[in-house]
Amino acid sequence: MIPSREWTLGLMHERGMPPHIIRHSKTVRLAAVYVAAVLQEAGFGIDVRLVDRAALLHDICKADSLLNGGDHALMGRRLMEELGYLRIGEIVGQHIRLESLEVNEAMVVNYADKRVMHDRVVSLQKRFIDLMNRYGKNEQSMQRILKHYADVSEVEQVLVRSSGFEPERLNHLNLITGDHTLDG
Ligand SMILES: [Fe+2]
């Protein structure tokens, strides 16, 4: 079962998602749908509607986790499961760490999120330099971020090899005027 766009946007507002996270999620949606379309063209059975909604909802519990702690991917997964949207929950639950290197909707949303810094599409490198500056506080956390960067680079390579996807093309999405002003 996949929720409607209307219901999805309603839930985001109902849960008090802050405007900057809504903006981030909308750009991730745009990037994810682009990647999904490339994969579809290459013959993969990717559900673009599922990707669209899961991308919008991937950080649905981020604000909660910043306030009260906890793993926001896992919290988002549980919330979506409680609401009866199991497939969305599976994808939200994997938006930080993928469970496999299978080309599927979870991979698309996970990768798209790594290509969006705030509400702009950037390279993986740029995104991880920012993460390093913000969260690389000691040797251990720096190593963790480097490992994560290596993992996501591998995901990018899987997408490139399996579909001919060109990572730089995603940057063109920054040329599309958004409706962000409507979010405050
Ligand atoms: Fe997140």
Image: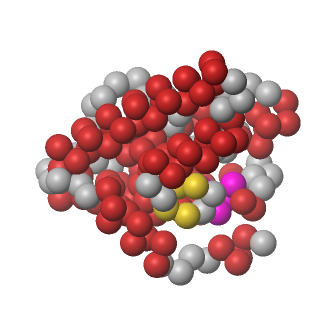
In which quadrant will I find the N terminus?
A: top left
The residue at the point 32 percent across, 65 percent down is: 169
From where the camera sits, is residue 70 visible? yes
Residue sticking out furthest to the left: 43
Residue sticking out furthest to the front: 139
Q: Which residues are the magenta region?
A: 21-25
The residue at the point 22 percent across, 47 percent down is: 160
Q: Is residue 66 above or below residue 163?
A: above
Res 165 → quadrant: bottom left
Residue sticking out furthest to the right: 67
- The picture places residue 77, in percent across and down from the top left corner, at 58, 31
From where the camera sits, is residue 104 visible? no
In which quadrant will I find the C terminus?
A: bottom right
Pick the residue in front: 39 or 111.
111
Dominant secondary-structure state across the stretch colored magenta: helix
- Relative placement, left or right, of 144 versus 34 is right
Pick the residue in front: 28 or 141.
141
Q: Is residue 4 above or below residue 174?
A: above
Asked whether residue 173 is drawn in magenta, I would say no
Res 38 → quadrant: bottom left
Pick the residue in front: 68 or 122.
122
- The picture places residue 2, in percent across and down from the top left corner, at 46, 47
- The picture places residue 131, in percent across and down from the top left corner, at 61, 41
- Relative placement, left or right, of 71 versus 77 is right
The residue at the point 66 percent across, 42 percent down is: 133
- How many marks are shown on the rendered structure? 0
Res 81 → quadrant: top right
The residue at the point 38 percent across, 45 percent down is: 108
Residue sticking out furthest to the top: 140
